[in-house]
Image: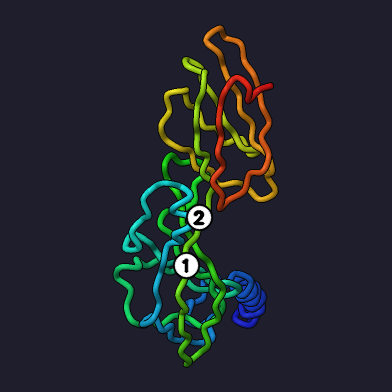
Amino acid sequence: MYRNQLFKLLLPCACLLALAACEDDSNWPKDELLTGKGTVDLSTFTLTVNTDNVAATGLAAPSVDDFSVIFAPVGHKADTLTMSYSTLEPSIVIPSGGYTITAQNIPAASLAWDAPRYASSREMNVTKNETTVLAPMDCTLANMMVKLAFEDVDGWSFMLWIEDGTVAQFTSSETRSPFFTVPEGATTMMLNATLPSGDTMLKVLTGIANGTVYTLNISPETFI
């Protein structure tokens, strides 16, 4: 009798534990959640850096050997795969499903100096037991360069910021260029000048966008 009562007590507990395990699929082996694997043919895959963008920045083009290629799964469970372009194998076998493939020389940053980010992204579907060829990718400028020039502002200091609050601080002797990643929906940036007297002036600048070189000539007339 006692054994039957114990069985009746333990059975509901076991059911509850089973339901809890089903709700959390993180405990399942990943291979059991995937539909199979497919092959990505990289034997003809090449990366290039857009020469027009390089010419516009006036900075040297990065070496493609310094680029990484990232396979990020979309809509299925798999690890994000990051590889160096210089050491890519002719082919790789990965879980089947959708991927966003991104090639880039540096990760995205809200602000960096003299640091153009070149990148390219595309969507690709890897089919179980089939081979998918990854086509060449041309990497274009993915952040915004602000090319600075100064006239009659010796001793002035400046703050330049995008709508999200990312601020670049510099003086009239600055020789580098800030590179901003412009947030989606941002349309303006603001320039604040502090004169040697301590007075300040503010100018709102429009026309900002990733993938562009913004030439900013700073003079007293800028703030009129």
Give the percent coordinates (x, y) of residue 165: 61, 35
Q: Quote the CA–CA distance across marks 1 and 2.
A: 10 Å
Residue occupied by mark 1:
138
Q: Is residue 10 above or below residue 148?
A: below
Q: Is residue 223 above or below residue 70?
A: above
| Quarter occupied by the C terminus | top right
Residue 9 appearing in the image: no
Q: Is residue 82 left or right of residue 127?
A: left
Q: Write the residue at 57% across / 73% down.
A: 123
Mark number displayed over residue 222: none
How many labels were placed on the picture? 2
The local crowd at label 2, few if under 14, some if 14 to 19, many if 20 or more residues have their Cα within 10 Å, is many
Viewer-nearest residue: 51 or 102 = 51
Q: Write the residue at 42% across / 42% down.
A: 114
Give the percent coordinates (x, y) of residue 142: 52, 54
Q: Write the residue at 49% across / 46% down.
A: 109
Residue farthest to the top? 197
